[in-house]
Amino acid sequence: MRYRNILLKLSGEALSGFREFGINPVQVQSIARQIKNVKKKGVRIAVVIGGGNIFRGFTGTASGIDRTTADYMGMLATVINSLALQNALERINVATRVQSAIGMERIAEPYIRRRAIRHMEKGRVVIFAAGTGNPYFTTDTAAALRAIEIGSQVLLKATKVDGVYSDDPVRNPRAVRFKKIRYIDILDRGLKVMDSTAISLCMENKLPVIVFNLGKKGSLESIMKGESVGTVVC
């Protein structure tokens, strides 16, 4: 395995599958199996999940909800998704811990960096819920922050497309996929890969990001082997 310590960033939509919203149990089980296959190779895995399949902060703001309140609602949505993935992993005998940036001791541990690292050393998958615990920060930023804190070798950004394109490939068939792109080029071009705060954190700390399609069978394991999959941001 090329990588031994990774952080996997999942969008909330990754759990909904072909549904417009909510959680698709079949899709969640599929993701859990991919994580298990990689974990069996001795890879330490942490996960950050978005909440867009349930609630998005900026959508709530557009509906007249105060931005801070809307962002907290979005954080709670990520906790729901985290518990769903934890359940799916434990059903296939993968020891998992959920750590939340917002205190809710009855259902999740509080986020403690040293405890998270210790869980991973013991072979447990750690799911970081509730973003950073602060409004105005996305789960992409939370993923970059947690990856840096726990010493991940790479941040894997799972999407529905197979990498970073020069434009939206759905709207523009002429869009070109990059095999490798620099952090600064992401920022200069305004490409919607991750928000600028997350990209800046990765750039400052030299944390590589691989953007790939999790829906493509075996893609996660191929990345672990060092094969060329998706787009590398470095």
Image (spheres, grey):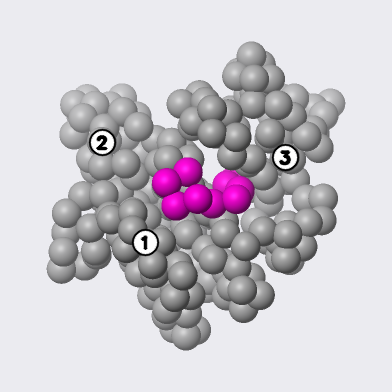
- Distance of label 1 from label 3 (alpha carbons): 26 Å
Q: Is residue 155 magenta?
A: yes
Q: Nearer the viewer, residue 146 or 15?
A: 146
Position of 195 compared to 225: left or right?
Answer: left
Identity of the amino acid at label 2?
Answer: Asn
Taking the spot 30% from the left edge, 49% from the top edge, the residue there is: 130
- How many other residues sit within 10 Å of disc 1, few (<14), some (14-19) or many (≥20)? many
Span highlighted in magenta in the image:
148-157
The picture places residue 33, in percent across and down from the top left corner, at: 58, 74
Q: Please state the horizontal and vertical placement of residue 182, each as a whole percent of the image.
A: 70, 26
Q: Name the residue: 46% across, 70% down.
A: 121
Closer to us: 28 or 138: 138
Q: Earlier in the sequence, mark 2 or mark 1?
A: 1
Q: Secondary structure at mark 1?
A: helix
Q: Nearer the viewer, residue 72 or 175?
A: 72
Using the image, determine if residue 92 lies above or below residue 54.
Answer: below
At 50% from the left and 50% from the top, the residue drawn is 151
Q: Residue at x 26, y 32 (%)?
A: 135
Q: Amino acid at mark 1?
A: Ala
Residue placed under numbered mark 2 in the picture: 134
Q: In screen coordinates, is 25 left or right of 70?
A: right
The quarter of the image holding the C terminus is top right
Q: Which residue is mark 3?
A: 232
Q: Calculate the distance from the C-alpha at mark 2 to the C-alpha at mark 3.
A: 28 Å
Find residue 116 and name its label. 1
Q: Where residue 17 sits in the image (x, y, percent)? A: 55, 58
Give the number of callouts: 3
Q: Is residue 208 above or below residue 12?
A: above
| Residue that extends furthest to the top in the rendered view of this protein | 188
SS class, disc 3 = strand
Q: Secondary structure at mark 2?
A: loop
